[in-house]
Image: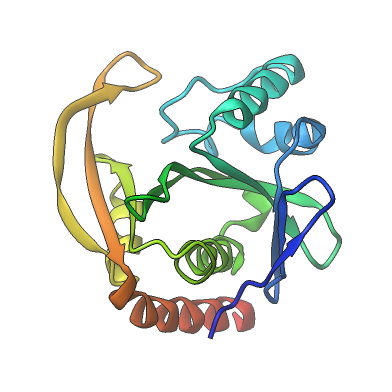
Amino acid sequence: MSHIIPELRSSGEQRLSPGCAVRLIPLSVGHAEALFASASDPEVWRWMPRPRPDSLIQMRALISQMLEDPARRCFAVQRLADEAVVGSTSLYALDLAEGRAEIGATWFDRSCWGGPYNAESKLLLFGHAFDDLGLVRIALRTDNLNVRSQQALTRLGLVYEGTLRSHMMRQDGTRRDSLYYSVLVDEWPAVRDRLLTRIAAKSTA
């Protein structure tokens, strides 16, 4: 059963039905101010490959650049409890003909760490990709030094596919290896169940 029902907006964008803690709404430049507080936090931005925005102008430019990419679907993460925008996440390298995409540009305000927000946003985005868009493969990549992310992806049942050595530049000028993980459409039900279990545990903690 799909956890996302697309509602067509007048602009042609999709607004996704909410989960229990968050909803995903189409990202816009108007979200820059709400997202800047978290994006400008060095610890929040620690593993992001692109430069950290240090002004609202740079935050707007970053969002504009993301929105201009035709192979990207960008979302703001809105907390249901107070309707605050607390993070962002995207499908990118989206290829509908080949049925594949990657998930990235994901970050959350530090106040959301340890809660159900990241797990539920993954649930909603995976559901949108597999159940609504009909994709057959979703990939995620992570810095080789980001062990916490690697462990989280493994716990969810994603499959480690390999490492791209010296794949990209870190913000400090060093080069990083990128570890690739993926989930296929026939593996999605098991990953969905693990996400639901994780969300339930974090919601009652």
| Colouring scheme, one of rainbow, by chain, secondary structure, one colour | rainbow
Residue 56, above or below 83: above
Residue for point 75% across, 36% down: 28
> Which percent across, then down, holds residue 107?
56, 44
Relative side of 129 to 176, left or right: right
- Can residue 48 be seen in this snapshot? yes
User: Farthest residue in the front direction?
Assistant: 97
Relative side of 47 to 181, left or right: right
Q: Quadrant of residue 79?
A: bottom right
Query: Which quadrant does the C terminus fall into?
Result: bottom right
Across the whole image, how many numbered discs are drawn on residues?
A: 0
Residue 33, above or below 13: above
Residue 173, above or below 23: above
Q: Quadrant of residue 99?
A: bottom left
- Can residue 108 be seen in this snapshot? no
Residue for point 78% across, 37% down: 31
Of 45 and 13, the residue lying toward us: 13
Residue for point 44% across, 65% down: 134
> Which percent across, then down, holds residue 78?
75, 56
> Which percent across, then down, holds residue 91?
49, 47
> Which percent across, then down, holds residue 65?
60, 22
Residue for point 72% across, 70% down: 18
Of 82 and 88, the residue lying toward us: 88
Residue 125, above or below 27: below
Relative side of 118 to 5, left or right: left
